[in-house]
Amino acid sequence: MTDISVRPINKLLIANRGEIAQRVMRTARSMGIATVAVFSDPDTDMPFVREADEAVHLPGSTPGDTYLNISAILAAVVATGADAVHPGYGFLSEQAPFARACADAGVIFVGPTPEVIEAMGSKLAAKALMEQAGVPVLPGATVSAGDDVIAAAEAVGFPVLVKAAFGGGGRGMRVVNAPEDLADAVASAEREAASAFGDGTVFLERFVVDPRHIEVQIFGDTHGNVIHLFERECSIQRRYQKIIEEAPSPAVDAARRDALGNAAVAAAKALGYVGAGTVEFVMDQQGEFFFLEVNTRLQVEHPVTEMITGLDLVRMQLLVAQGEPLPDDSVVATINGHSIEARLYAEDVAAGFLPASGPVDRLRVALTDGVRVDAGFEDGSVVSTFYDAMLAKVIAWGPTRTDAARRLSEALASAHVHGVTTNRDLLVRVLRHPEFLDGRTDTGFLQRHDPAELSAPSADESARRLHAVAAALAGQAERRSTARVLAALPSGWRNVRSGLESTQFEDADGELLVGYAIFGTPSRGQQVVVELDGDRETLAGIELLGASAEHVELAVAGVRRRFAVQHVGDTWYVDSLLGASAFHELPRFPLPEVHTAAGSLVAPMPGTVVRVEAAVGDRVEAGAAIVVIEAMKMEHQIRAPHGGTLAELRVEVGTQVDTGEVLAVVDEDEASEAESTRRVE
């Protein structure tokens, strides 16, 4: 065998951001390797920037100006004297030109060779190569402008999946069931792929209805060794993006595990693969599997493999990149227990998984036995509109799958997640769902089970009411703690009490008026009289055991409960074993409301207008797309609320819009109004 010299890495630049940058830094630090971060304008105050030994500013906000800017990143390499680059995942991690530019600059690229990335960067070339290697593949066809896409789709067989040839993460993907929907799906996928990956090439592939998404972790080194580290299942998805992943798969037995592993290793050997990679498959209801793609990078879900094998995959990447052979413990790795990962996203599930942005007021997950958190945000961080909206990955290990699911759901349910809207409640309910616990997982799970219903607030009505009381009492404690005189007296105290103090709250379920009066002192015991919306009987006999601006302890009907409270601006967050609530405190003297015109189309999130589908004066149908916004690399259609005439159009392509901004106004016509009246009647 040819002697391969070892080239130690002394300083590592991470060409990425957020939690994966921190994850790589953690391992590099344990290996005695110095780290360098690069950061954009919106990321200036993010934790990963502070954690690096050195950091270089990339001026700008968009990925193209910053994390996709090869020349700027290589300039940072030169400025800091870094001798290696870790690309993380996403951005430049699967860009052959970047890997080649690193090699040309004499810098170690922590990943496979540019030639392998190039071969696998095109899903079409990858399929052809896998077919030659004997790996089963799905039928497909490349399409472009001017092609007879319907004929191509019929040759593949409906339903078809329109798929970006480059990139991943579910972007540039559309399922099409009927020929008449194909042209629009291809055009939309091309635009989204071009925006996310810099290449708008798409192809058609046979769509397997409700398959399992199975992937195999592979590793190769420069000494000719190739191994696999078992499979992961990533079937719980929304919009073709994974949200819950686990290892091993509950549907894979020993024989099928061997078959999957052998196919993945054969694929890696056909490529001459070096470094970490993932061979992805779809598996139908009969257990037959088909090749999807090779991801030539570390996967978001790599922690579940680490948890069941005890290996550090980033350490393995760095060892291989230095020219060392795969460590012995990886070659003889076995499966120990079960691990499940949940991706905590800033998004509004009930609104169709719309990405959310804004401040993270609190993000705290208890690190109990078997629980790991890889987070890119902390208290006070801000989720921008320019990048992926994942806040953190919460991972749990257990001796059995049931144990892992229980630990993970409890960790998420008890977490304090305040500020930006998240998918936390959806994740908890999926993990506790009977079908999930039985291992009946496939990519159609969230089509069978309404995500909006699964993501309903965790606190029921009785919990909501107790949480509102806790928020009101925390408010009075906060006010008394800052009082300049007589701070020991409860707020509103008077010799003859003729009325209650009150706080008016509002949440997603409406308004709630909390009236309260506190009797006694903390040293001698305090009783509290509470009425909710004028009803004093609903919560009779409450004992106040303690109250501060951050914690309230109550005894209700003999049951003692502790409530954690956070007050930010006019918002009160309350967490307890009963669930989580967020209340907006209404002013005592509110300003007059400002109403938008009837028929207004408003932006559901901040973003950029990428397409306008109608002009002022056009007749539009109810539900017709009028404006298309791109936010966090995904397209979102803003549709007409009713049929009528487009009376106003306040944006154009390229306009930056904010949440709630009026984009257009549709005047309802008589026919549409009559139809609306008929439906009401």
Image: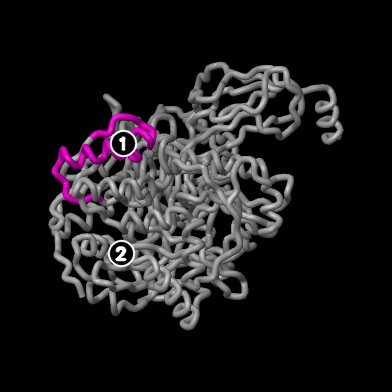
In front of the other: label 2 or label 1? 2
In the displayed image of the protein, which residue is found farthest to the bottom? 255
Is 418 or 668 nearer to us in this picture?
668
Q: Amino acid at mark 1?
A: Asp
Q: Which residues are magenta?
A: 57-85
Q: Residue 299, relative to residue 15: is it above or below?
A: below
Q: Classify mark 1: helix, strand or loop.
A: loop
Side of 203 where 257 appears, left or right: left
Q: Residue 1, relative to residue 503: is it above or below?
A: below
Provide residue 587's location: percent of width, then percent of height. 49, 24
Is 7 or 57 nearer to us in this picture?
7
Q: CA distance from mark 2 to mark 1?
A: 32 Å
Q: Is residue 537 visible?
A: no
Residue under circle 2? Answer: 274
User: Which residue does the image show at 22% across and 72% down from the upper left?
Assistant: 327
Is 365 or 563 nearer to us in this picture?
365
User: Which residue does the image show at 28% across and 69% down from the upper left?
Assistant: 311
Quarter holding the N terminus is bottom left
Provide residue 147's location: percent of width, then percent of height. 65, 45
Magenta stretch encompasses residue 80: yes
Is 204 or 467 nearer to us in this picture?
204
Say few, some or many: other residues with alpha carbon within 10 Å of mark 1 (under 14 / 14 to 19 / 20 or more).
many
Side of 507 where 361 appears, left or right: left
Way the structure is coloured: one colour
Residue under circle 1? Answer: 43
- First-in-chain label (2 vs 1): 1
